[in-house]
């Protein structure tokens, strides 16, 4: 415990009536800086812009880290190399470093960005948050002696609590004396008050020395907020300076998409030379969403409008496409245009972008910031950033279509869409890069290297190509051929159908199941023959993987005959088998109505069960072969509607639910099943999932549960409780009119109505097994 005299001596040391003058050979004596005085030196326009851009790169990455929910420890690890690269700031003990030059750059950059970000409340808020975080990082890493010297050089208006006050408020339970406590107004440490890390009394907060940084950070934040407001009031005086205002306008957009470093002025090829024939494969493997969308639109429409051509053409130029190959590529792409028209209207523009015509300026590829800040694309336009310019539904569909084969699933979409909604478009693009390159060892938070976010389309493509070169071989050994997989899977499903069939289903169902298996084997055998096996010269794992990717690219970008069927995956074919079973059930029901042959009725009752087996199998096949797509999701829902919606409703009509009100209920049953499937497709991404991507529950009763009703109808059929025999159990009720009229309703129809309501229920949650 300090004596009273010792305590008084310590108070005299802690008192700081004003900013203490520090005698040093350095103009900026500390790494830590409250930026009290603006720079008054001569500053060139180039230095003005360079200092601000380098600082903005650091601040933009800090904001990106917040959007990616990094902890302070992760933030420190990511920002340390970035700060050393763009904004180094060494301690006073670094003898061989020009400390004045480093701190001058830091000082100038801060004040330039003040001018850029003081213009609106939102920009001021984001700037203050990023700057405070940068100060916190420096405070945490600063030398203890230099930190103490900095604190002693300023007045933070705190009072050291007396030993009596400390003992009264924080009674010590040990023989050790309590540490120092600083007494400040509680409004200066709201974060500590919120976390209950201080003792409050009489409007004062007693802050332990371990939390002293909070007082300093809050003081820095308050100081910067006031300075920004003053700068905003003085800013109109700069409106007439045509040299500075455009720079400030550009800097103020830096938080939207970050600031690209080596790519910001890229105007020449940055990688290996490309040929026109390589672009299709490159687009599938390495392009970001903006360029992938342009390529798909070009292949689909055989044309791009001016701004789309400009954005895509400059990207390809920097990617490594020479002018000669560019002319070949664009000529082939514009296949609907005659040679004369192409040479007159498009050839000049292509050469102009390469600096070979007009004023012969070698134009740089557009950065993410330039693409994001472009105007909203009009009808028929394809340029811009999909993350900003697409609607939410279109963006999700586009991303799953583009990157579904590379590992992006619907389970990843909530995280990506939340980032898009918050306006961090480049962070969403970075997260897509991490997911689609996880197979090359990219982990969450690594970004395109060193934790950096995507800030330029060519940066994305270059990093993707670099990872591919490092990755080497693709598919693991021992992969089965498509023909082997499909035959095994379909035959296994057929055996399960036969084993679970009811006694009366043998002849029609067996014949139909055999026909399904035979037809699918024929289709898949033909598909496997088109794909080289491992015994063929071209049948390496790499070539198989390339063929698969090429097929996907054709599915997305071409309009060839039967391109849809030719590009079905194995899981899609199994899903269609489910739809075939439902369709056969409908036809068997119709046959029974025409012939009264119970074999057809048993077949109609059995085919939905076969459809359930295929419905179960398609998910297994998709997960096994790591295949997922938007078309597969839609196929699954359409097949389920046929097999578990329309087919059961028609079976109910066949066995005797034939009154006017019965048909109304059964129609409602089908429509509720339709609505349930549509809602499932729209909300599946938002349902909580486990680590493997499996949903925890169903919202509403799943439509395959209608097989429970089919089982009841099968039991009635076996007992003879159907129309034409003993009749439907529980009879009918007459809601209006005379018995036998339109007001009659079978009592059991109420069960169908309740079942329909359960399918569209929002609150009913069925655990997923």
Image (cartoon, rainbow, N blue to C red):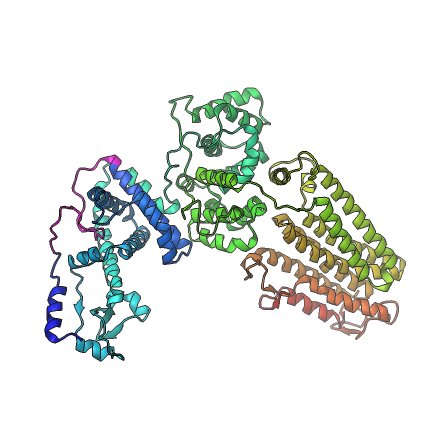
Q: Position of residue 423 (x, y in %)?
A: 42, 50
Q: Say which of 335 and 379 sits in front.
A: 335
Residue at 59% in and 60% down:
694
523 displayed left or right of 213: right
Q: Position of residue 269 (x, y in %)?
A: 44, 30
Q: Quadrant of residue 103?
A: top left
Q: Quadrant of the N terminus?
A: bottom left
- Point out the residue furthest to the top here: 340
Was residue 702 drawn as part of the magenta stretch in this picture?
no
| Residue 761 in the image, given as x and y percentages of width and height | 61, 66
Residue at the spot x=56%, y=61% of the render? 690
Does the rendering let one see residue 116?
A: yes
* Residue in the foreground of this view, choosing between 249 and 609: 609
527 up-or-down from 3: above or below: above
Res. 287 visible in picture: no
Q: Quadrant of the C terminus?
A: bottom right
Residue sitting nearer the eye, 52 or 375: 52
Q: How many marks?
A: 0
Q: Is residue 43 magenta?
A: yes
Depth order, front residue of 748/188: 188
Q: Position of residue 391 (x, y in %)?
A: 50, 48
Q: Which residues are magenta?
A: 20-46
In the drawing, does residue 88 fall left or right of residue 338?
Answer: left
Taking 90 as reference, is 745 left or right? right
Is residue 274 shown left or right of residue 645?
Answer: left
- From the image, give the main secondary structure of the stretch colored magenta: loop
């Amino acid at each position: 415990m300090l004596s009273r005299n010792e305590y008084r001596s310590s108070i005299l040391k802690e008192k700081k009536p004003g900013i203490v003058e520090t005698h040093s050979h350095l103009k900026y004596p500390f790494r830590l800086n409250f930026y009290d005085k603006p720079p008054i030196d001569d500053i060139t326009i180039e230095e003005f812009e360079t200092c601000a851009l380098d600082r903005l790169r650091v601040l933009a990455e800090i904001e990106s880290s917040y959007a990616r929910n990094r902890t302070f420890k992760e933030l420190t690890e990511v920002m340390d190399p970035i700060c050393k690269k763009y904004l180094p700031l060494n301690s006073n003990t670094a003898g061989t470093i020009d400390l004045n030059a480093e701190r001058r750059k830091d000082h100038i950059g801060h004040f330039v960005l003040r001018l850029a970000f003081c213009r609106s409340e939102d920009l001021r808020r984001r700037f203050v948050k990023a700057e405070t975080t940068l100060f916190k990082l420096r405070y945490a890493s600063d030398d203890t002696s230099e930190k103490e010297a900095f604190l002693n050089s300023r007045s933070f208006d705190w009072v050291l609590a007396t030993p009596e006050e400390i003992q009264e408020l924080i009674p010590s339970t040990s023989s050790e004396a309590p540490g120092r406590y600083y007494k400040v107004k509680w409004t200066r440490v709201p974060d500590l008050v919120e976390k209950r890390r201080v003792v409050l009394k009489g409007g004062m907060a007693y802050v332990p020395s371990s939390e002293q940084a909070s007082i300093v950070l809050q003081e820095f934040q308050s100081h910067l907020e006031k300075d920004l407001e003053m700068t905003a009031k003085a800013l109109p005086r700069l409106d007439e300076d045509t040299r500075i205002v455009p720079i400030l306008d550009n800097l103020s957009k830096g938080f939207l998409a970050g600031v690209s470093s080596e790519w910001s002025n890229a105007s020449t090829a940055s990688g290996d030379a490309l040929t026109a024939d390589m672009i299709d494969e490159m687009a599938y493997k390495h392009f970001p969403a903006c360029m992938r969308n342009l390529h798909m639109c070009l292949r689909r429409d055989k044309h791009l409008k001016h701004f789309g051509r400009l954005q895509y053409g400059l990207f390809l130029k920097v990617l490594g496409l020479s002018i000669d190959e560019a002319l070949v590529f664009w000529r082939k792409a514009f296949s609907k245009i005659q040679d004369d028209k192409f040479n007159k209207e498009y050839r000049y523009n292509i050469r102009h972008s390469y600096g070979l015509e007009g004023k012969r300026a070698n134009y740089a590829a557009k950065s993410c910031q330039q693409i994001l800040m472009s105007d909203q694309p009009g009808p028929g336009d394809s340029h811009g950033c999909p993350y900003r310019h697409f609607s939410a539904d279109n963006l999700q569909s586009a991303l799953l279509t583009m990157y579904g084969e590379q590992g992006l699933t619907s389970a990843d979409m909530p995280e990506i869409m939340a980032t898009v909604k918050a306006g961090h478009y480049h962070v969403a693009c970075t997260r897509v890069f991490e997911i689609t390159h996880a197979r090359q060892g990219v982990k969450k938070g690594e970004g395109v290297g060193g934790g950096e976010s995507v800030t330029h389309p060519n940066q994305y493509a270059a990093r993707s190509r670099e990872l591919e070169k490092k990755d080497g071989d693709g598919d693991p050994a021992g992969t089965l051929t498509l023909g082997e997989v499909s035959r095994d899977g379909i035959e296994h499903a057929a055996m399960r159908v036969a084993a679970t069939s009811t006694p009366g289903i043998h002849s029609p169902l067996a014949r139909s199941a055999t026909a399904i298996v035979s037809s699918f084997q024929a289709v898949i055998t033909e598909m496997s023959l088109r794909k080289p096996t491992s015994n063929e010269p071209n049948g390496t794992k790499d070539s198989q993987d390339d063929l698969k990717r090429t097929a996907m690219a054709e599915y997305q970008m071409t309009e060839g005959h039967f391109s849809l069927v030719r590009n079905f995956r194995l899981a899609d074919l199994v899903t269609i088998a489910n739809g075939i079973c439902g369709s056969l059930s409908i036809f068997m029901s119709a046959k029974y109505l025409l012939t009264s042959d119970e074999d057809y009725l048993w077949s109609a009752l059995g085919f939905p069960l076969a459809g359930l087996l295929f419905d179960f199998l398609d998910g297994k096949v998709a997960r096994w072969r790591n295949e997922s797509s938007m078309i597969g999701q839609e196929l699954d829902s359409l097949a389920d509607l046929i097999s578990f919606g329309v087919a059961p409703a028609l079976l109910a009509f066949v066995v005797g639910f034939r009154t006017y009100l019965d048909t109304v209920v059964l129609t409602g049953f089908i429509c509720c099943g339709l609505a349930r499937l549509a809602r499932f497709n729209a909300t599946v991404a938002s349902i909580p999932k486990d680590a493997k991507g499996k949903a925890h529950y169903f919202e509403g009763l799943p439509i395959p549960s209608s097989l429970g009703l089919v089982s009841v109808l099968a039991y009635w059929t076996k007992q003879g409780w159907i129309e034409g025999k003993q009749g439907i159990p529980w009879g009918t009720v007459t809601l209006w009119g005379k018995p036998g009229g339109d007001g009659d309703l079978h009592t059991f129809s109420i069960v169908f109505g309740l079942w329909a309501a359960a399918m569209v229920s929002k609150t009913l949650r069925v655990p997923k097994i």
